[in-house]
Image (cartoon, rainbow, N blue to C red):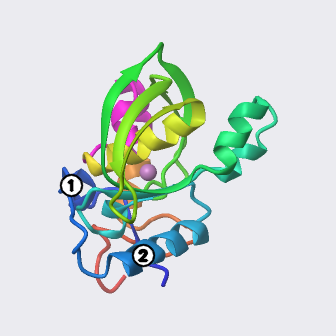
Amino acid sequence: MILPIVAYGDPVLRKECTEITADYPNLKELISNMKETMYNASGVGLAAPQIGKAIRLFIIDASPFAEDEDLSDEDRAVLKTFNKVFINAQILEEEGDEWAFNEGCLSIPDVRQDVYRQPKVTIEYQDEDFKKHTEVLDGLAARVFQHEYDHIEGVLFTDKLSSLKKRLIKKKLENISKGKINADYRMRFPNLKKGK
Ligand code: NI
């Protein structure tokens, strides 16, 4: 089932999400619905707060990035299979000199901006069977992880922009929260006036 994606301005996107356990109700179904929702919106990641649940769960399928012609064969191979469920994820370490990448977010349609992040992360998470993993990610895989991880901490990529850039997109963000946007997927708007 395709779920509506929560738009910028909804307080659920600002919550520090809580950990879950294997007995979380209907978890398998929730994950499967999140996947369907992400693919329907052509996203490479989707975090639980974006469908209205403040829990530490997100999914990533970065395989579309594997088509990027500037990648090394090694990076391409990693991205092709970077399709995972992340439960109770933590970042243990972030390393390296910050680099810019043009990010977007399904909750903030039509806004894309360069965001600076460190290139390498050591992470810990549980998969959908609650098996624990520790991994090192770099490049685009790290980038997508960091963006989704921010969601479960209540952080959006627009928070990371310079104050000038923030001013420039302020009106656009307000419009998104009011539903004044044409996304080609279903959304839920916090400030949509009833009856309009
Ligand atoms: Ni996002």
In terms of secondary structure, where does tag 1 sit?
Answer: loop
Q: Residue 184: in sight, yes or no?
A: no
Pointer 2 local density, CA inside 10 Å: few below 14, some 14–19, many at least 20: some
Residue 161 appears at what percent x and percent y? 40, 29
Residue 21 appears at what percent x and percent y? 21, 65
Label 1 – label 2 distance at C-alpha: 19 Å
Q: Which residue is mark 2?
A: 4
Quarter holding the C terminus is bottom left
Instruction: Look at 76% across and 39% down and name the residue there.
Output: 68
Instruction: Look at 22% across and 74% down and name the residue there.
Output: 23
Residue 109 appears at what percent x and percent y? 51, 56
Residue 108 lies in the magenta stretch? no
In terms of secondary structure, where does tag 2 sit?
Answer: loop
Mark 1 and mark 2 lie on one chain; the one further toward the N terminus is: 2
Figure label count: 2
Residue stretch rendered in magenta on the structure? 154-171
Residue 17 circle label: 1
Pointer 1 local density, CA inside 10 Å: few below 14, some 14–19, many at least 20: many
In front here: 55 or 88?
88
Seen in the picture, residue 147 relative to 178 is either above or below; the reply is above
The amino acid on which the numbered mark 2 sits, given as a three-letter code, is Pro
